[in-house]
């Protein structure tokens, strides 16, 4: 799971560069929107994992693991 998370976050600089190169007119707004999307995902992931575990799927369920480890 650590490798999966590291690979997901290792792609952030490449995505940031791509967004900055595409948003010629408003690079700051595009950059902020990109980072905000990561922040929203970081906030919702534990909640969704908790819902899956609370629904009875258990800690080792594929749904809880997929939700929690997706970048």
Image (spheres, rainbow, N blue to C red):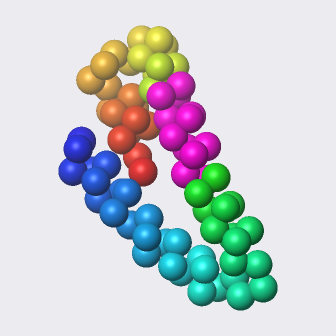
Q: Main secondary structure of the magenta part?
A: helix
Along the horizontal axis of the image, is 71 left or right of 10? right
Q: Quadrant of the N terminus?
A: top left
Image coordinates of residue 53 in percent, x first then y, are: 42, 17
Image coordinates of residue 47 in percent, x first then y, are: 53, 25
Image coordinates of residue 64 in percent, x first then y, are: 39, 29
Image coordinates of residue 35 in percent, x first then y, are: 59, 57
In the rendered image, the vertical position of residue 33 relative to residue 16, given as above or below: above
User: Which residue is located at x 47 percent, y 12 percent?
Assistant: 54
Number of numbered labels in the structure image: 0
**Residue 62 among those drawn in magenta:** no
Residue at the front extreme? 28
In the rendered image, the vertical position of residue 10 relative to residue 14, given as above or below: above
User: Which residue is located at x 61 percent, y 43 percent?
Assistant: 40
Along the horizontal axis of the image, is 4 left or right of 8? left
User: Which residue is located at x 57 percent, y 46 percent?
Assistant: 39
Q: Nearer the viewer, residue 3 or 57?
A: 3
Along the horizontal axis of the image, is 37 left or right of 71? right
Along the horizontal axis of the image, is 5 left or right of 38? left
Q: Quadrant of residue 69?
A: top left
Span of residues in magenta: 37-48
Q: Quadrant of residue 27?
A: bottom right
User: Which residue is located at x 74 percent, y 68 percent?
Assistant: 29
């Amino acid at each position: 799971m650590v490798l999966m998370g590291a690979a997901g976050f290792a792609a952030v600089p490449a995505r940031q560069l791509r967004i900055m190169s595409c948003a010629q007119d408003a690079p700051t707004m595009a950059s902020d929107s990109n980072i905000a999307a990561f922040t929203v995902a970081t906030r919702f992931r534990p909640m969704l994992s908790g819902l899956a575990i609370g629904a009875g799927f258990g800690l080792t369920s594929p749904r809880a693991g997929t939700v929690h480890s997706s970048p």
